[in-house]
Amino acid sequence: MSKYMWDWNTVLRIIAEIFAIVGLLIGIFVFWGKRKIESYFAKELKDHEAKLAKELQDTKYEIDTLFDKVSMVQKKEFEVLPIAWDNLYEAYRCMEVYLFSGIELYNFTDWNSSQVEKFLRDKQCSESAIAEILKSGNKGAKYVSMQEEIKKVNFHNSIYKFNDYINRNKIFMKADIQIAFVEAISFFTKVLSTLKKSDNFSDTGDSITDLNNFKNEVKAIMDKIEFLVQKKLQFEKAL
């Protein structure tokens, strides 16, 4: 009986030792597993933070790059608009000369060739024009005709220069401003191609009214462009 009890106590002790060992192993496993999980998540968190930091840096770079491009376009636009306006005003000035300015008539009948040549040089006529006028049978009429042609050519050249500048730089302009400039070019072209010069208009009230209407129409376009540019400048200043 004593031996049996001893064996039972031994079994209980062994079982207790086993449970202790198992508990220790479980504790070790839990501790190791916890450390392992913490290490895994810490690495994942670190990787995720690094990824977010890189994405943030890339996004910031893209925003800065885009902002730089926008700033460059805006800067270019502010460079382009004054020159475009100068070209517009020059075309308007040439239109006024073409339509409204008369040419003083000269009767060269009593002038000798030297006097005519001096007069033409004082008027800064080209050598070819001087030669052509001097050999003409009606020097006065030829002078007037050539001056009229010069006014027309100057108007044509101013339109071409204006149109060429707008076409080369319209990418830097807002759509509404670009459209207004193109509208002005179309009007100048219409004047050049379809209207008579003021000298050829009869002195009727209707003719004078027509010419004034032409002038008022282009002035309205110029006022619209001025308004759009001023509006843009105020908007950019507010930014």
Image (cartoon, helix red, strand yellow):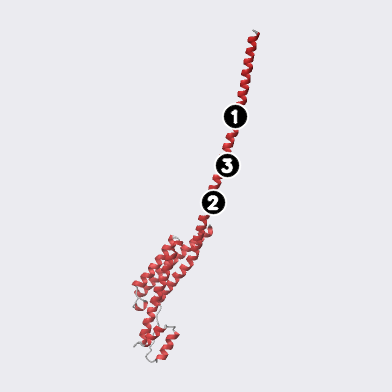
Q: Residue at 52% x, 55% y: name it.
A: 65
Residue under label 2, please give it: 60
Whichever of labels 2 and 1 marks the residue nearer the N terminus, that label is: 1
- C-alpha separation, residue under disc 1 versus residue under disc 3: 24 Å
Depth order, front residue of 96/175: 175
Residue nearest the viewer, comparing 62 with 74: 62
SS class, disc 3: helix
Residue extending farthest top: 1
Residue 231 place in picture, x, y as percent: 48, 61
Query: What residue is shown with label 1?
Result: 30
On the picture, is 209 further left or further right than 233? left
On residue 46, which mark appears? 3
Q: In front: mark 2 or mark 1?
A: 1
Q: Kindly state the secondary structure of the residue where label 1 is placed.
A: helix
- Residue 125 location, x and y as percent? 42, 83
Secondary structure of the residue carrying tag 2 is: helix
Question: Residue at the spot x=41%, y=84% of the render?
Answer: 127
Callout 3 amino acid: Lys
Where residue 151 appears, as percent x and y from the top left, is: 40, 77
The CA distance from mark 2 to mark 1 is 44 Å
Give residue 115's quadrant in the image.
bottom left
In percent of width and height, residue 81 lies at 47, 65
Q: Is residue 96 above or below residue 173?
A: below
Decide which of tag 3 and tag 2 comes sooner along the chain: 3
Could one spot residue 39 in this view of the protein?
Answer: yes
Is the residue under label 1 in contact with that under label 2 (CB below 8 Å)?
no
